[in-house]
Amino acid sequence: DIQMTQSPSSLSASVGDRVTITCRASQNISRYLNWYQQTPGKAPELLIYGTSNLQSGVPSRFSGSGSGTDFTLTISSLQPEDFATYYCQQSYSTPTFGQGTKVEIK
Amino acid sequence: EVQLVESGGGLIQPGGSLRLSCAASGLTVSSNYMSWVRQALKKGLEWVSIIRSDGSTKYADSVKGRFTISRDNSKNTVYLQMNSLRDEDTAVYFCARAASAGTVWGTWGQGTLVTVSS
């Protein structure tokens, strides 16, 4: 299976900060990379699919980029509702997730 | 409104069996790729199984031979039959629908907790 590695595992940031999370695949997955947001006690929610396509209803402060093995999720200006855990997931082959990045309030 | 509602979780002893249900509304399960994804407590996400619109199925290696995914079109419900349960199967199990054919999940249920313990 393809291994997905996120960094950092956690970060502390303030409202208004620009935040970047990276995700690395153990092999080339083209652009078959998706991002989810999960808050405690809730199901994950799809933010971005196909590396850079914003899911309907997701604010434009979220963006994604990359290809091959290296990908990033950027939040341009962190809002209070963005404090959550973020997961990358590859849909190139048998699906696998990164271990998650917890975004906490500084 | 599209909605997925899981049920059937609970406490079960190692070696036991449990069947989870995912009742769908606002979508037709037979026309979609439906998956089960699980999350151990305070851990990450793990894909478990998928049933495609053509009825074909696939499983994670960790559950192959023990779990079976199926659907009842008349009830618009997807099931996960879990046999020979192990401690490591303890998790919240989510039902999810792919946004299009594949494994990009745009719709999720609220999850049902399965605890395997003696």
Image (cartoon, rainbow, N blue to C red):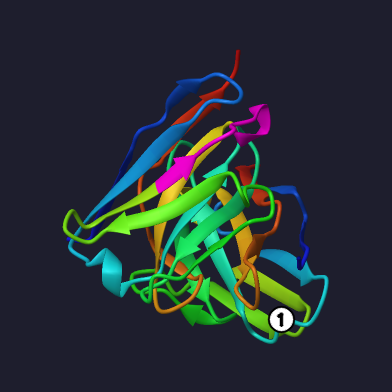
Relative to B13, A7 lies left or right: right
Residue type at mark 1: give it.
Ile
Question: Which residue sits at x=21%, y=57%?
Answer: B76
Q: Tell me if A58 is positioned left or right of A78 in this view.
A: left
Residue positioned 64% across, 85% down in the render: A31
Disc 1 is attached to a residue of which chain?
A: A
Horizontal side of A69 relative to B73 (left or right) equals right
| x then y, percent, for residue A24 | 78, 69
- Residue B118: image x %, image y %? 60, 12
What residue is disc 1 on? A29
Could you tell me residue B101's position as x and y percent?
43, 79
Q: Position of residue A75 (x, y in %)?
A: 57, 66
- Badge 1 density bin: few <14, some 14–19, many ≥20, Cα 10 Å: some
Element class at badge 1: loop
Question: Relative to A10, does residue B1 appear above or below in the rendering?
Answer: below
Please identify the quadrant where the N terminus of chain A is shown.
bottom right
Q: Is residue A60 visible?
A: yes
> Total marks drawn?
1
Tell me what residue is drawn at x 52 percent, y 51 percent. B37
Residue B85 in magenta?
A: yes
| A85 vs B78, nearest the viewer | B78
What segment carries the magenta color? B80-89
Q: In the rendered image, which quarter is residue A72 located in?
A: bottom right
Q: Name the outermost residue toward the right.
A: A26
Residue B27 is covered by the magenta coloring: no
Q: Residue at x 49, y 71 (%)?
A: B104
Res A6 → quadrant: bottom right
Image vertical order of residue A71 relative to residue B109, above or below? below
The extreme front residue here reads B65
Q: Name the image quarter holding the C terminus of chain A.
A: top right
Q: Give B95 or A6, whichever is nearer the viewer.
A: B95
